[in-house]
Image (cartoon, rainbow, N blue to C red):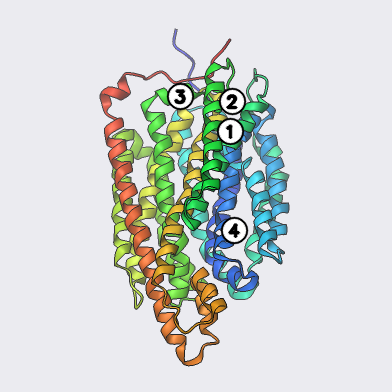
Amino acid sequence: MNDPAPSRAGTREWLGLALLCLAVLLIAVDSTVLDIALPFISESLRPSGTQLLWIVDVYSFVISGLLVTMGSVGDRIGRRRLLMMGAAGFGLASVLAAFSTDPLVLIGARILQGVTGATLMPSTLGLIRSNFQDARQRGTAIGVWGAMWGGGSAAGPVLGGWLLEHFWWGSVFLINVPIMIVLVALAPKVIRESRDPNPARFDLISAGLSMAAVIPVVFAIKEAAVHGISWPLVVVAVVGVLAGWAFVRRQNSSPDPLLDLQLFHRPVFATAIATNLLSVLALAGVLFFGAQYLQLVLGFSPLPAGLLMLPGTLASMIGSLLSAPLARRWGPRLALAVPLTVAGVGAAMLIAVGTGGGAVVYLVGFMLMGLGTGTALTVTSSVVVEAVNPARAASASALSETAMEFGAATGVALLGSAGMAVYRHGLETSGLSGAQAQTAQASIGGAAEVARVLGARADQLLGSAHQAFVDGLHLAAALTAILLLVTTVLVWATLHPRRLHSDETPAGPRKT
């Protein structure tokens, strides 16, 4: 007897999707708007180079440590309920960030944004999986979901540029508040609640182990990239690795694991997770340098700089919308390999930018990167949610997003720190006092600040800072192109049709 056809989504489901996209839009805007605000934060709060990196990436560190736990919580207590709780908390954390008067306060606010933001992403994708039962409509919905991520990234620099032209840097955080109010007010009316109908006992030990595995390892990577390897950092990394080993053992022995590791036996699922990690890692390092290059090297004000970044993020939006038809026509292998190759070409183009010009090259290169990664990351999101039983959709999507957030944080830590090391090494600081040299070496914004009081020597310092910063950007771009090439080879090698046909049964939660 044939199974009944899945019910098709109606007006309520599509209105609910629009509201879910607001949450995605919020997170995307918040990530890119901060990039363009970095020079203003640096001037106002005077953070050290390490503090500046923490302001950018601590949000991703916290999210990456909590996503798996929050996805499991959403499956148990209800994804809509968790979404509303997280939205309210994120709005409050944004207010605290906006009115921070010290780098440490801003870092603390970003941590709170990470804790509450970890509830949003798995809830949105999990709700799409449960509210859209027809596979074709679900693919379209996930494409729109991914496009809103690209659209938010596109809106972030432009909206942030306009705000920074008229208000202080804290305004870039306050834009979150009205979106969160709308989300909390309307979610009960247009989004159907969904949860695991037979939830297992929540494993608090596994939740703790997942955080203890991710956060120490990422912290050790970041600090080693900035300050070099030391024995304390090795100890921290080993603690994280041991916690990860204990977490894996516990999941494999539990009849109701927090994370079903059997999913990784499927080549499509495992490759999707690896693609998320490596692609976002590669992209994050270039994004860290992009806004600073346009403003502090080429001299654009915030709004024109945001407009120059707009085509790249709009291309990402277009790629997300194209992902569903491409995946149906080409299959996952080509639908991932081709966009990743396009993104790699775009990254390689950025090696050609210079201190005297390069805005057009940057625009085209970033546009190719946006088109390629937008398509690939939306394909992988669809692959992940299709691989599991709908009752565990939030947990599975949380794993995918953990890889993305881990990649974003590690990309800033590794590629950003590597580029900044090139900057510090190439900066000419002769003739500066010790304090001036330290300020100039901390960031290119610091060098511009020192140059303002140098008089006749200002041009020499700025010329050196611009060239050193561009050299660092070239290194980050080259490493990005290599990582994207490696990811393309991985996809092509692991998603061979014969391997895919060997395991077509979607994995689901294990039962006692």
Q: Which mark is residue 55?
A: 4
Pointer 2 or 1: first along the chain: 1
Q: How crowded is mark 3: few (under 14 residues within 10 Å), some or many (20 or more)?
A: some
Residue tagged 2: 258
Residue shown at the point (35%, 59%) measured from the top left: 477
Disc 2 residue type?
Leu
455 with respect to 492 (left or right):
right
Write down the quadrant of residue 510 in the picture: top right
Residue tagged 1: 210
- At mark 1, the secondary structure is helix
Residue tagged 3: 263
Disc 4 residue type?
Ile
Q: Where is residue 278 in the image (x, y as percent from the top left)?
A: 40, 44
Mark 1 and 4 residues: CB-CB less than 8 Å, in contact? no
Q: Residues within 10 Å of mark 1 (few under 14, many from 20)?
A: many
Pointer 2 or 3: first along the chain: 2
Disc 1 residue type?
Ser
Whether residue 9 is visible: no
Q: Where is residue 468 in the image (x, y as percent from the top left)?
A: 39, 71
Marks 2 and 3, how far apart at CA: 13 Å
Q: Nearer the viewer, residue 154 or 465?
A: 465
- At mark 4, the secondary structure is helix
